[in-house]
Structure formats: C-alpha cells, structure tokens
Amino acid sequence: MLQTFQVPGGDGSIFPVAPTVLLGQVPVLSTLLIRVVAGLTTLPSGWGWLICAGIGLGYAAIAVPFGLMTGFLQFRWDLNWNQFFLTLVFPAFSEELVFRGLLLPSFLENASAGAWLFGLSLSTILFILYHPLNARYFYPPGYPMFWDWRFLVLAGWLGIACGVSYGVTRSLWSAVSLHWLAVIIWLFVFGGKGKLHVNQTEMLHESH
C-alpha cells in the first residue's frame, strides 16, 4: 500500500524491488543488472546535458594545460572517420558500462553520499589500473604509453569527471559522451593516434 505523498517517489526510503527472480532475488547480480538498466534507460534532461558540458569544459581546462606543459599532448590533426565512430563503442561505451555503470550506485539505490563517494573512488582507481594492465596483457600497442604517469593522471581526472557526470544526470549516456569526446580529441587533435602508432611500430621492430 502506498500513501498519496509517496507517489511518485516522495519517500526516499522506499526502494523498488523487481518482481522477477533475476532482477530481484539473485545477490550482487541483481544489483549490478539494475544499475546497468537504470543507467542506460535514463536520458539526461536539457539541464543534465548542460551540466555534462560544464563538467567536460572543466576537465578540459585542467587536462589540456597539464598535457601541453608536460609534453604529453601535442597539436597534431589526424582524423579517421572509421576510428571516430569505433571509439564510441570502445573504449567509451564499454568502459563506462563497467567502471561507472557497474561500480557506481544508481539513483534507485538511495545510496548515502559516503557510499557514492566510495564507489567513485573505487571506480576511478580501478579505471586507472585497468589501462596499464590492459596494455600489458591484452593491448600491446598501448604499451608503454598506458604506463606513462601523465596518461594515468589524465585518465584519473577523466574517470572522476565521468563519474560525477553520471551521478548528476543519473544517465550513463552523459558519461559515455564525455568519455568519447575526450578520447577523440586526444586521438585526432592532440597526437594520441600517433603515439599509439609509434609504440606499435617500435614493438614490431624490437620483435624482429
């Protein structure tokens, strides 16, 4: 029974429970699945997109000067339309699905600020560690660039920006968009594609 003031959700202590076995009764898996579904089926509002844009500009205001001053970023226009759209799937969508969609509490969980900050910290740390481990075991062209401390700092800041964007808008699509934009600008404007290509060429020479 719901009282009138509890519709459509005025009482934050009421948590929706799915009627199915998969969504409502399987420990851990149920929570993770609900998080993903909630994040993907929620679209940012107009204000949400504006906030996401503001977060993106804030990240750029920090990341670009840092990258230029440390020499990690260099202006180098090299656009490839196939890779432009492929980066939307990987890394943007796939990584956000895991590091924000699975690891951060959704708005349906009514998580406390402390729990949410813990999730943000955990997801950011794992997001940073993922890149060098991925290069070491699954993506050799990314080695040693993904071990570069400057790249890891930028990745950490991006993880925080995407996490905050997701938390504010309640939508994974804002985090995916922010991640995608950061990757394509790095790859095609600031020499990221060239760095990956150079590292891959060096590894091929070493193997011979």
Image (cartoon, rainbow, N blue to C red):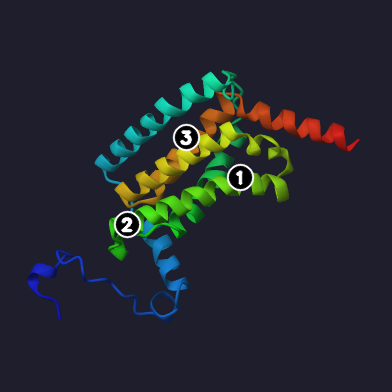
Residue located 36% across and 51% down the image: 171
Q: Which residue matches tag 2?
A: 114
Which amino acid does the dot numbered 1 rest on? Answer: His
Do the residues bearing badges 2 and 3 touch, measured as CB atoms within 8 Å? no
Query: Marks 2 and 3: which is nearer the front?
Result: 2
At label 2, counting other C-alpha atoms closer than 10 Å, the crowd grade (few under 14, some 14-19, many 20 or more) is few
Residue located 26% across and 41% down the image: 46
Sooner in the amino-acid sequence: mark 2 or mark 1: 2
- Secondary element under disc 3, as helix, strand or loop, is helix
Q: Quadrant of residue 87?
A: top right
Which amino acid does the dot numbered 3 rest on? Answer: Leu
Q: Which mark is residue 131?
A: 1
Q: Position of residue 181 (x, y in %)?
A: 47, 34
Q: Which mark is residue 56?
A: none
Sooner in the amino-acid sequence: mark 3 or mark 1: 1
Sooner in the amino-acid sequence: mark 2 or mark 3: 2
Would you place residue 149 above or below residue 136 in this image? above
Which amino acid does the dot numbered 2 rest on? Answer: Gly
Q: Position of residue 99 (x, y in %)?
A: 49, 53
The quarter of the rendered structure image containing the N terminus is bottom left
Q: CA distance from mark 2 to mark 1?
A: 26 Å
Query: Marks 3 and 1: which is nearer the front?
Result: 1
- Secondary element under disc 2, as helix, strand or loop, is helix
Q: Which residue matches tag 3?
A: 181
Q: CA distance from mark 2 to mark 3?
A: 29 Å
